[in-house]
Amino acid sequence: MQQSFADAAAMVAALRPDRPVTCYRPQVLADRARAFVTGFPGEVLYAVKCNPDPLVLQALWDGGIRHFDTASLAEIETVRRQFPEAGCYFMHPVKAREAIRTAYERHGLRHFVVDHADELEKLWDCTGHAGDLVVMVRLATARGAAVYDLGGKFGCSVEQGAALMRAAAARGLRVGLCFHVGSQCMTPTSYLAACTLARQCLDRAEVAPAVIDVGGGFPTSYVGPQPPPLDDFFQAIRAGLDLIAPPADCQVWCEPGRGMVAAGASIVVRVELRRDDHLYLNDGVYGSLCDLKFPGIHLPMRIIRPGGQATAPLRPFSLFGPTCDCYDQLPGPYMLPADIREGDWIEIGQAGAYTGVTRTGFNGFHADETVVVRDGAFLPEPAMRPPEPAHIAA
Ligand SMILES: Cc1ncc(COP(=O)(O)O)c(C=O)c1O
């Protein structure tokens, strides 16, 4: 059972932590899950890769999530240990033969993604020509306004997708279509454009889909331009589905990660040294902050100074992680009080997605302390936006 505090400042006052601490907000997570479950026109699969912490999975379950996008055996086992009755779907386009066999035989998975003819053969072979497979064909999408483009690594063309659909259907298998518009996608129309590709693929394949899966990509609120409301994305998806006109028995899925859990946690780190406008922290790129390397992933930050107020105006700082490695730095700039100093803590908000999962033990720094806090999400404010032109660390 995690310790629970009113907020991150109360946690710092009580614990004065010398290592980074993740502050989870189960209520925020459950509310966000509920917003997806009630607003999305279909089934919502949580993308476990984003944050598989049992507390997070429990909060999402409490918010109504019953299905999970699992991309490895370890993720399937994590979900099934906690929720034996949960639905799991193998949504990684490239899988080890052993993983396919174990997922099919031991864990009972039936839905597997492919984006290449050889992967379809592998699937067919490893399941002993199972007739109850549902082959999910993944289409590559055009890069829209997403921070991460996943199309370069995964997905096939409309023509290749149609060929894969026909090849699976020729074996008597049911077939679905899926795509991912890219993570932190800011434009609802990207989903409509991807649905247009799906329509073209279905026209070529002439195979009725059993599932249309519009993937993840739903954005959260970082410092900088704010994303449109979630409902705008659901509306664009509804318009896309009208275009696809799937048969009545076709299921519709999405697989949110970031947009579901980012707001559900913040991370509290400590300043170990200030050198002018450089702050050396006890967490960094090899710890929880790897995702911050991507332009556009600018998390809100605020100082915590127990027993004292930091009232100085905000000014830009660059952040440096604890390892002796020079990649371990985040030029930002990040707006923090001008008088910030060694021994202050910084709360980093919107940090529930792709933080703990990418932590390493590089240089002996690894921290996985977690607590629960009971305040609302720590959202960005306009003052956190750095002035132009960008200040770059030396
Ligand atoms: C197949 C798949 N589905 C869903 C997600 C979750 O994406 P996001 O966190 O952008 O919602 C990912 C992320 O990499 C993914 O690869």
Image (tube, grey):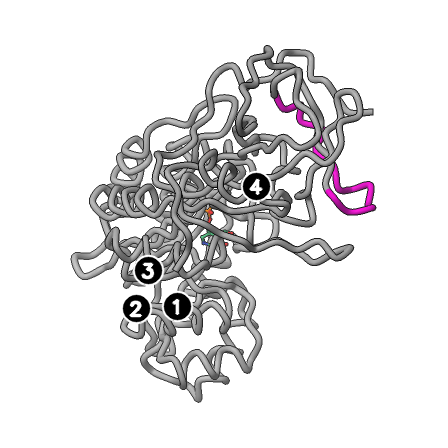
Q: Upstream in the sequence, badge 1 or badge 3? A: 1
Residue 326, horizontal then vertical, whole percent? 82, 41
Tags 4 and 3 touching, CB below 8 Å: no
Residue to which mark 3 is pinned:
206
Disc sitting over residue 79 in the figure: 1
Residue 215, horizontal then vertical, whole percent? 40, 50
Q: Nearer the viewer, residue 124 or 72?
A: 72
Residue to which mark 4 is pinned:
16
Tags 2 and 1 touching, CB below 8 Å: yes
User: Does dot 2 land on a helix, a strand or a loop?
Assistant: loop
Q: Upstream in the sequence, badge 1 or badge 4? A: 4
Residue 295 falls left or right of residue 11: right
Residue to which mark 2 is pinned:
86
Residue 149 falls left or right of residue 41: right
User: Does dot 3 land on a helix, a strand or a loop?
Assistant: loop
Mark 2 residue type = Ala
State which mark lies toward you, 3 or 2: 2
**Structural distance between the alpha carbons of marks 1 and 4:** 33 Å
**Visible residue check, residue 384:** yes
**Structural distance between the alpha carbons of marks 2 and 4:** 39 Å
